[in-house]
Image: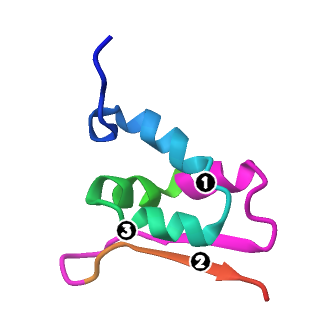
């Protein structure tokens, strides 16, 4: 069996791995790894999938879609202190 690098894994496999990242701080770090990961994390379904795993007890991930070339999509985190 040949070895496969993570960059060659299908998007749905990488998405499933990223959804399992346990905390918001780590998700934010993952978002900065590469464009592919950034785009997967920005998908609106990512927040639902991630929070349904119980990994965000006191935080909320929100997504704002782009509304033109000068206003790109935004990913943010609201965390209760």
Residue 33 x %, y %:
35, 62
Question: Circle 1: is it few (<14), some (14-19), or many (20+) Cα within 10 Å?
Answer: some
Q: Which residue is mark 3?
A: 32
- Label 1 vs label 3: CA separation? 14 Å
- Label 2 vs label 3: CA separation? 15 Å
**Residue 41: mark:** none
Say whether disc 2 or disc 3 marks the residue closer to the N-terminus.
3
Question: Helix or strand or loop: what does disc 3 sit on?
Answer: loop
Say whether disc 1 or disc 3 marks the residue closer to the N-terminus.
1
Examine the rendered structure and indicate whether residue 17 appears above or below residue 74.
above
Camera-nearest label, 1 or 2: 1
Q: Residue at x 52, y 49 (%)?
A: 18
Q: Is residue 69 left or right of residue 18?
A: left
Examine the rendered structure and indicate whether residue 1 appears above or below residue 55.
above
Q: Is residue 56 magenta?
A: yes
Examine the rendered structure and indicate whether residue 14 appears above or below residue 25.
above
Q: Which residue is mark 2?
A: 77
Q: Quadrant of the C terminus?
A: bottom right
Question: Helix or strand or loop: what does disc 2 sit on?
Answer: strand
The magenta stretch is 46-70
Q: Residue at x 59, y 77 (%)?
A: 77
Q: Quadrant of the N terminus?
A: top left
- Label 1 vs label 2: CA separation? 15 Å
Query: Which corner quadrant of the image does residue 8 belong to?
Result: top left
Q: Residue at x 46, y 58 (%)?
A: 41
**Residue 21: mark:** 1
């Amino acid at each position: 069996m040949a070895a496969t690098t993570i960059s060659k894994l299908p998007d749905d496999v990488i998405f499933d791995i990223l959804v399992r990242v346990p905390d918001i701080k780590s998700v934010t770090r993952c978002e900065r790894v590469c464009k592919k990961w950034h785009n997967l994390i920005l998908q609106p379904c990512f927040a639902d999938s991630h929070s349904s795993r119980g990994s965000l007890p006191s935080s909320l991930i929100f997504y704002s879609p782009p509304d033109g070339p000068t206003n790109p999509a935004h990913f943010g985190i609201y965390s209760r202190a």
